[in-house]
Image (tube, rainbow, N blue to C red):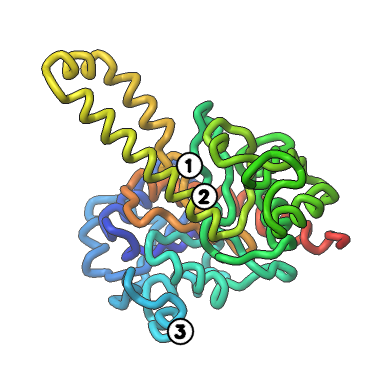
Amino acid sequence: MRIAIDAMGGDHAPDAVVTGALKILTTTSDIEIILVGDETKITPLLAGKDTSKISVIHTTEVIENDDEPVRAVKRKKNASMVIMANEVKEGRADACVSAGNTGALMACGLFVVGRIAGIERPALAPTLPTIDGTGFVFLDVGANADAKPLHLMHYAIMGSLYSANVRGISNPRVGLLNIGTEEKKGNELTRQTYELLKGTRNIQFIGNVESRDLLEGVADVVVTDGFTGNIALKTIEGTAMSVFKMLKGALTANTKSKLAAAVLKPQLTGIKKKMDYSEYGGAALFGLQAPVVKAHGSSDDNAIYHAIMQASNMVKNDVCPMITKAIQELDI
């Protein structure tokens, strides 16, 4: 299997990207890596390493974070991200990974890789941590600010298939994010979606779920529109960072607290690892003809490693063909 990677995307590119790619090759034998980016910056990072399963496509053009996504994809034909997506489109790669401009990657997914027939709105779907360490798939978190009930039903199907076949969760529980758990709660979108999901075959719909229960593991898949999902995601991220900052401040305030911190360090490290997004990979773009994974912009080599592993697992488990088949068989 061949994974194309935007070597120039992300805050720590290309160093973290190349290191993560090299790491994946030490743990699996069935992956080949295509690095797309500035060869003069990539080659020194490969010095002394086994590069038998790595190829480099040279380009110096990059889509920057402040570029307008759609315009950049259309105008910067030789950008590392666009070439990466084109490798998938032309069948020279089975999946792709980038930590670059999120909007541009979504545009590459739509205009270069292409949508699955029947999917009107692809969804951006990270796997977020839960207290029990299981995690849940959350979609959509920003690919589409507006959504229709049909779109959310597609999200539920795609998230359920991914959870079952990649994450190994038997009969995943699907929840609809809402302002209350009662069936009639919410706006017109959530009420209509609730009725639609109740009648959707091959998913275990458990009803409405509230945002305060997400990290408790109330569901394995949670669906919502991209506007609501993005706000919820950033609230979770911001709250987690703030709590860790306050905890760090409290544990370094004086000598007594520093001694307590030294004793608690293994437990605190374990908590931080359990809540680390990078352990779950990146955010997959569901609804495309091939796996496209968005790694966090600040990804280190470990996050890149897990994002590549996530993409490869989607290929191995035929997630995109399964989604295609499920959408074709819908009777609505």
SS class, disc 3: helix
Asked if residue 237 lies left or right of residue 15, the reply is right
The kind of residue on which mark 1 rests is Tyr
Q: Which mark is residue 126?
A: 2
First reached walking from the N terminus: tag 2 or tag 3: 3
- Pointer 2 with pointer 1, Cβ within 8 A: yes
Tell me the distance, in whole angstroms, between the alpha carbons under discs 1 and 3. Answer: 31 Å
First reached walking from the N terminus: tag 2 or tag 1: 2
> Circle 1 is placed at which residue position?
280
The kind of residue on which mark 2 rests is Pro
Give the residue displayed 21% in from the left and 23% down from the top: 251
The correct choice, above or below, for 76 with respect to 40 in the image is below
| Residue nearest the observer in this picture, 164 or 235 | 235
The correct choice, above or below, for 259 with respect to 165 in the image is above
SS class, disc 2: strand
Give the residue displayed 32% in from the left and 39% down from the top: 242
Q: Position of residue 302 (x, y in %)?
A: 36, 43
> Circle 3 is placed at which residue position?
74
In which quadrant will I find the N terminus? bottom right
Name, please, the residue furthest toward the right: 331
Asked if residue 257 lies left or right of residue 224, the reply is left
Q: Position of residue 47 (x, y in %)?
A: 22, 55
